[in-house]
Amino acid sequence: MADLPSDKVEEAKQVFEVFDKKYEGKVDNFYIGDMLRSLGLYATVAECEKRGQTKKTGEKTMKFEEFLPIYSEFFKMPAKNFGTYEDFMEGLKLFDKESNGMMSLAELTQVLVAMAEKLPVSHVEEVLRSTDTKEDADGLFNYEIFVRKLLQGPFPNES
């Protein structure tokens, strides 16, 4: 515990207690990533699974003393660059079949739920709702507007 500032240890304890659904001093390992994200750290599923996160609930639990070193490790990691406007635009241009700044909303959803760091459909729906992204009569949307809104936030984990 000495390698983290005391306020960060206290913050981690508060988050841990929120995820301790049975009030037993233990949290299901399935929630490691959720706890880290609640603490403002952006850990991928793969990074969390390397540190004990399970693929489904009910497989394994951990105590706060076991979570703290994981939090400390992520806390000390340098901040990652999660993509610039240009990165997002370049990636989405691959789906712009007519080179007109429009792509299929269904295709974006499919990419987000099926590739690499898969997002649950509910998270995709939340992103689309928070960016007010809607498809037109042809099922398309302007991805430049989407990317601008996405990068503007809100980012609830930032102070």
Image (spheres, rainbow, N blue to C red):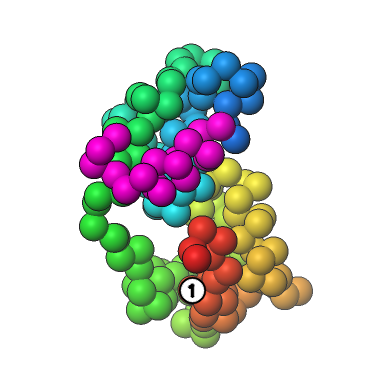
Foreground pick, 155 / 72: 72
Q: Is residue 55 left or right of residue 69?
A: right
Classify 10 Å Cα crowding around label 1: few (below 14), some (14-19), many (20 and above): some
Q: Is residue 137 left or right of residue 67?
A: right
Which residue corresponds to the image point at 57% horizontal and 43% vertical from the top-left? 120
Foreground pick, 45 / 146: 45
The x, y position of residue 31, in whole percent, is 50, 32
Secondary structure found at label 1: helix
Residue that extends furthest to the right in the rendered view of this protein: 137
Reply above or below: 138 against 117: below
Q: What range of the chain is rendered magenta?
A: 1-17
Question: Does residue 108 appear in this view?
Answer: no
Which residue corresponds to the image point at 41% horizontal and 49% vertical from the top-left? 7
The residue that disc 1 covers is 151
Question: Does residue 77 appear in this view?
Answer: yes
The amino acid beneath tag 1 is Leu
The x, y position of residue 40, in whole percent, is 44, 54
Foreground pick, 65 / 119: 65
Q: Is residue 8 magenta?
A: yes
Could you tell me which quadrant the N terminus lies in?
top left
